[in-house]
Amino acid sequence: MSVTALPHLPWEERPAGSSDVVWRYSRNPIIPRDLIPSSNSIFNSAVVPFQGRFAGVFRCDNKKREMNLHRGFSENGINWQLDDQPILWQYDDPELSLFEHRYDPRLVWLEDRYYVTWCNGYHGPTIAIGYTFDFEQFTFLENALLPFNRNGVLFPRRVNDRYLMLSRPSDNGHTPFGDIFLSQSPDLLHWGQHRFVMGVKGGWQSTKVGAGPIPIETPEGWLLFYHGVLTSCNGFVYSFGAALLDLDQPWKVRYRGGPYLLSPQTYYECVGDVPNVAFPCAALYDPSTGRLAIYYGGADTVTALAFARLPEVLDFVKTTSEL
Amino acid sequence: MSVTALPHLPWEERPAGSSDVVWRYSRNPIIPRDLIPSSNSIFNSAVVPFQGRFAGVFRCDNKKREMNLHRGFSENGINWQLDDQPILWQYDDPELSLFEHRYDPRLVWLEDRYYVTWCNGYHGPTIAIGYTFDFEQFTFLENALLPFNRNGVLFPRRVNDRYLMLSRPSDNGHTPFGDIFLSQSPDLLHWGQHRFVMGVKGGWQSTKVGAGPIPIETPEGWLLFYHGVLTSCNGFVYSFGAALLDLDQPWKVRYRGGPYLLSPQTYYECVGDVPNVAFPCAALYDPSTGRLAIYYGGADTVTALAFARLPEVLDFVKTTSEL
Amino acid sequence: MSVTALPHLPWEERPAGSSDVVWRYSRNPIIPRDLIPSSNSIFNSAVVPFQGRFAGVFRCDNKKREMNLHRGFSENGINWQLDDQPILWQYDDPELSLFEHRYDPRLVWLEDRYYVTWCNGYHGPTIAIGYTFDFEQFTFLENALLPFNRNGVLFPRRVNDRYLMLSRPSDNGHTPFGDIFLSQSPDLLHWGQHRFVMGVKGGWQSTKVGAGPIPIETPEGWLLFYHGVLTSCNGFVYSFGAALLDLDQPWKVRYRGGPYLLSPQTYYECVGDVPNVAFPCAALYDPSTGRLAIYYGGADTVTALAFARLPEVLDFVKTTSEL
Amino acid sequence: MSVTALPHLPWEERPAGSSDVVWRYSRNPIIPRDLIPSSNSIFNSAVVPFQGRFAGVFRCDNKKREMNLHRGFSENGINWQLDDQPILWQYDDPELSLFEHRYDPRLVWLEDRYYVTWCNGYHGPTIAIGYTFDFEQFTFLENALLPFNRNGVLFPRRVNDRYLMLSRPSDNGHTPFGDIFLSQSPDLLHWGQHRFVMGVKGGWQSTKVGAGPIPIETPEGWLLFYHGVLTSCNGFVYSFGAALLDLDQPWKVRYRGGPYLLSPQTYYECVGDVPNVAFPCAALYDPSTGRLAIYYGGADTVTALAFARLPEVLDFVKTTSEL
Amino acid sequence: MSVTALPHLPWEERPAGSSDVVWRYSRNPIIPRDLIPSSNSIFNSAVVPFQGRFAGVFRCDNKKREMNLHRGFSENGINWQLDDQPILWQYDDPELSLFEHRYDPRLVWLEDRYYVTWCNGYHGPTIAIGYTFDFEQFTFLENALLPFNRNGVLFPRRVNDRYLMLSRPSDNGHTPFGDIFLSQSPDLLHWGQHRFVMGVKGGWQSTKVGAGPIPIETPEGWLLFYHGVLTSCNGFVYSFGAALLDLDQPWKVRYRGGPYLLSPQTYYECVGDVPNVAFPCAALYDPSTGRLAIYYGGADTVTALAFARLPEVLDFVKTTSEL
Amino acid sequence: MSVTALPHLPWEERPAGSSDVVWRYSRNPIIPRDLIPSSNSIFNSAVVPFQGRFAGVFRCDNKKREMNLHRGFSENGINWQLDDQPILWQYDDPELSLFEHRYDPRLVWLEDRYYVTWCNGYHGPTIAIGYTFDFEQFTFLENALLPFNRNGVLFPRRVNDRYLMLSRPSDNGHTPFGDIFLSQSPDLLHWGQHRFVMGVKGGWQSTKVGAGPIPIETPEGWLLFYHGVLTSCNGFVYSFGAALLDLDQPWKVRYRGGPYLLSPQTYYECVGDVPNVAFPCAALYDPSTGRLAIYYGGADTVTALAFARLPEVLDFVKTTSEL
């Protein structure tokens, strides 16, 4: 295991009187919809520690409501500076130049660089992989999977000498179904040996589930935060919970927490471009303190922050587990 | 007629300047979504006077978003203590142990005990009947009807020597239709002689209608508060209005008020797990003063209270009646 | 057990070379769509032995495509004379006079008379019960169940002193779901203690299932022929198979044959007002020979006949059973 | 060109720090949902200068949720007095008396009188034309088009000797498509030579588009504010933008601004009877100052006001144009 | 009245034993799907007497399944020669050159020439009008109505000095609704004073109705053959019936026959590109004998012929009338 | 190029008088639905030359309507013997044992063995790859792609040192969309560098398109027969046509024939379990004569045969090409 200490991650203690395993930052949202001039909304975004501060790839929908990815930096993980222009991807094959949309990025340090995965419009949404060494130059590797897919999430290291990616096969619209699968690759270009990981259950996760932040390696397994969707008579409700995947065969779910950890209940989660959405895409973890800072989108409009302690999350997942 | 005086029911006068027939309690919601540790939301619930105070059966969805029924007590009908654990039903036939969900209870004193009806998941939603003498032991009698049904509401006495129940036959999803029917029974176990009572009309009640609180006997007929649903391009809107049913042949509608009495307009009715819902399940009535206290769910998230005076409601129903 | 010998039931031997458990009559359809002047189609109909010959209640859709029930007689069960006018039902309560449609009748000798159940339009389809002593006068008893329901089928005797009826709760359209339930009654008027009997499985019965002819009592259980529906990209396909229900607790399925017994494959089953329908509503059985004659509708247009031997059917159900 | 000076139109300067081309009035909404006793909501309404003050035709949905048109007057264009009773239309042919609903009016001075167009329920929604000389008597001319249509908007003068009307053909429900067409007429009664003007594009205008206020004549073309709809997983989102139509062949789009000018972001746009709606129906323009005051409905519940300067809008449309 | 004698129209007597008011030609279909090399199917087509023989405009779908109109001639109205190439329309405004599809033509002699109306794809289906004097040159006048519309049918003379057209407003797909409206015009270019004529009823005409052949003037009113659609669980079924419209106010229905006159029952009506379609677009009438020859499409694949006698049809419509 | 001579492939000359590029075998269907005792239907199947005769993998749906693959042999390619039991696949990873369904196989000689691809149910339909050397032992390699996918078709040789597979990403139901993509692999296990090949066009191929038989190498490119689907109001219609793909970059379409080559027009294509389906899965080609024998499923019920000459097909594709 090689998770690095990160003592300066954003943090706020649990509010007095609360027994929630995950709690919200009191000054949410941390990124308003109009942080940059061109943006309609900024949400479902990913961050990593970078050179003593923090860097991120952010989903910014502009005022045409086009979805794209923007770079950002922060000293404290809370206050962010974002480029007003989208990331310019470099690529060899002009076929990759097709731009329908780019959204919901994830970001991971893997071996020697930062990899970005995102939902890329190539004749329908699919999972693209790119990388950067320095957050200055960004290279578009390839579309890893065929359409239609969303929520592609890489593991932070190879397992059994294979790169691993979670994803949620979908259709070409507001998909009313969705399970999490794992795919394996020798080279990040070609993927196979696909395995079913987990599907829907009742209640808050009865319509679809999808991987959230990069899985966090723990002695008890890979900790996966994931979103779940319930369909009410007035649409989708996105909450999130957590599960523990087997360390060596991560398509095997060891524990799966029954209740959600956070559901849309505040104004900035319930009111916005898409009401009732709490959608996590990144988590920072400091193994020295067990602290977790979870970044999630609110109402598909703003970016918010929540906190937890890893041991408590593991305990929650195990004690409430329903497989 | 045997409606008992209830001078201590919750009450607040109509706000100055308002001419509304039904008005909201100024400190709504009276029950927040997180009143008990396990709850995601508490709404669409039923109360009765009980031993000088108030008792109730409450719909509490837990943090898995499972729907269940919880017991509660209150001194004043406004501040409630609820059990964190759901009601444990006792029954003879193990077939009744099947639990898919329980929700939207109604509660009525009928002859010698308190009967509870609720929407019970038995291979689809249907209407179950149970009872309690003391709010300590609860017995599950039977599923009164076949799936798919919702909003089963008993009358507070036999009519023509038959027990009567209103219900709203539905489908197995977010039913986009729904009329109110009346069923008759010699024994509360077997039901027949089903009669159509009322269907949809235009506007606020154009998608479906369903009985709300236990009908209130008045010299002019059974006063029925009922919800109506309008389908906008962004989903269902639940409001409520009232009608007067014939005393002896309650499947005959004598008057039906044209406008709604209350529609979702406040934050707690418009924002929550299901936006734009005001859904009444219980009403307390004091014949000595004519006061009515109506309990209704807000946004499928919290419980709220509204007030009215019976003579004004009757007048409203009759003067705006459209059959 | 009281099944009467019926040696003169229609019969034709299994074709040479066939090993089918159920085989078609070689002169199908036995009733063409235009047997009577007013009819557009005649199908999904029920017959019984009656005074040494056969009587029946037939679904005839007229040339407005209104669905109604007509009386018919036959000497041999194959050649039928039908009234051009629908059956005139007698009833006390004028509420029963409402006519939306009547279709898919079943017919059973029960205690002292012939009972008819059918799908009756009363603010939506539900199950009505009527009776006749002599096929001259027909009395409409009541709507047994609330809408929305179809395929109500009575048992030929009381079980545990209760009348029993199978039905398939539905919605108000071309229902894309449907399970079989059993309801119980002390008086044929009021029904309760509803029990789930069986739901959909894969393949030919993956969309919905519904009871067909009156269950046939055998020492091994109640033999139930039932239809199953598969949804192809071009619509529903109705086939039929069989199951054995427990003699004393008929909501318990003892065996359920895996494959269908007959699926739409001939011109008169595949081409007509509704392509690809084979829908059984009645079966004649001669215990002295084990012969079965099954009446079924073809393509919602004509009436056809198929044959089988009861011991072979029981053997089929048991050896291919999948619960 | 004959646009009259209107120096007293409502006005408020752009907020400090903002660079928005269109900005909201700081005291929005200007008309609350309950301004008149009978109203559930007041929105999607039209105003004109009239005798030194302002007159308008307002969509008021009453508490049955019936949609109708009411007259109103204002001294300053911000504070309005509305009649509690709907406008009484006079007409010769009793066929025009049919009332299903009337909504979303537009109002224009054309030659010698004020014309009103609205969505009129005549066996489905279509576009009706009426007129008034004095805002005292209102005459219903005719239904100009066949159902199903919405958002009929007249030009303020004849072009090529033809009256012109924009409209958005639709279906009979919550239409998930919609393009803008132009129709021509010699007499305002008969319409033909229909021409396609513009259809959907990506993002905020990907589901449907429809004309908003009366087009404003400028040397560079007819300035058309129009609404666009995006379909999220939780329903429609109505924003608005602008385009410039050819002066002489107004079915030809010269420029079309890429981003929206205003999308639902405030509480009164995001929360209400239909969440996430900003829907413009009228604009006042003062050529002497270039000031524009745009009236728009918020959340299908209230009426709001926004401001802009015409030269800036023209510049925006041209510099961001995507055809 | 000016209906010309047409003694040489195609004719075959009613089959012995039949009492049908409309009966099929024994050698149907008269035009097979592959009559011309380019055609996939030929159906829903219109014919008129022309210079002692017969001329027609035919819907031919080619092997790309593009829908277009072809010219044809026949000596006897039964055996037809069709051009392999579509009609080339001449027009002034290049906007009319847009070709999405052309289908379901009607053809009428009106004043001084033959007018063709058809369903024309102009940003969606609408009704176009063209004409020919000689079946050599064809001129495209204009799109008479806005999309979305189908089944535009002209009257054969002006009424009250107005040209009249029936049509069926629709949506942009396989419209699940549809009523018949009448529009009026001074010049065939501009249309207004739209009036509702008739809508759906139960049974065979419960989904939508649309005008068929050109209305035939009789002393008792305009005889209108029209199609009606029923939706089964396996799709639409197109039958046809008849109504009598008021001579002077043809939007008033005087009589409307209850049953269908012909429903899809033969192989060529039930099996083909769209199963279960009988769709009439033209009728020839000989007032000297009362004979009617009705051309209709079978299964959207071939063209068939049926016969009737006008007095019998009028009698049928009146005696079975249900308004 | 290495296509082997195959002079004994099934063959029948074009019927006299026909100019069709593809024509049907006069004794179709060659495989009836009940060729083996267990089968409900046999269709959408693949064949190859094998040891001087022919071998094949056949889709047989059994009488439960389970879909599976069966082996078959034939001396002449027309008369087939099929195993009554499905193929038993061997595999190492027990995860591959999951059986939901197997259908629509393709079969290709590739390097050293016969590879089978089929639609495999693994938490939804996806593309599996297996192989056999001898048609005695069959090995299941892996699921090549994530769900949801159908119509996976391998190329008969590596191109640019990569194995190539066409597929049609879909959803989990009766997918109303579908384009053809190409994926590349170094090892047949891992796939990437996915490229869009071709999507829907109008008419017969307006709903979805999917690859049919193994592409045939010609000097002018890879000849691809593919199916196209049109959605009528009564469901899908499956026809097939052809295109030519670039030899070295096969994701580039060089020519695409406009009309279909064969559409469902015969009884065995129009009537059956799914009406109106002609679905090709295999083609035999003899380069010495240019003869082609195309195997296709009829009405998802039987297997049929059609013939063509390669030079004529190439000519057809090029002269009618529309890109």
Image: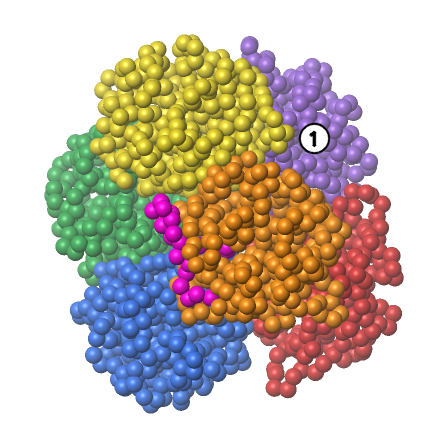
Chain colours: A yellow, B green, C blue, D purple, E red, F orange
Would residue E182 be found to the left or right of residue C128 on screen?
Answer: right
Q: Position of residue B133 (x, y in %)?
A: 12, 46
Above-or-below relation of B51 to A14: below
Whether the magenta-drawn stretch holds residue D171 is answered as no
Residue E156: image quadrant is bottom right
Q: Position of residue F58 (x, y in %)?
A: 49, 60
Residue at 29%, 25% (x, y): give it.
A218
Q: Which residue is mark 1?
A: D323
Above-or-below relation of B56 to F74: above
Above-or-below relation of E193 to A285: below
Residues drawn in magenta: F82-105
Mark 1: which secondary structure?
Answer: loop
Would residue B104 be found to the left or right of residue F225 on screen?
Answer: left
Whether the magenta-drawn stretch holds residue F90 is answered as yes
Dot 1 crowding, Cα within 10 Å, few <14, some 14–19, many 20+? few
The quarter of the rendered structure image containing the N terminus of chain D is top right
Q: Position of residue D216 (x, y in %)?
A: 71, 26
Name which residue type carries label 1.
Answer: Leu
Q: Nearer the viewer, residue E213 or A223?
A: A223
Residue at 37%, 22% (x, y): give it.
A283
Residue at 31%, 48% (x, y): give it.
B151
Q: Position of residue A299 (x, y in %)?
A: 44, 28
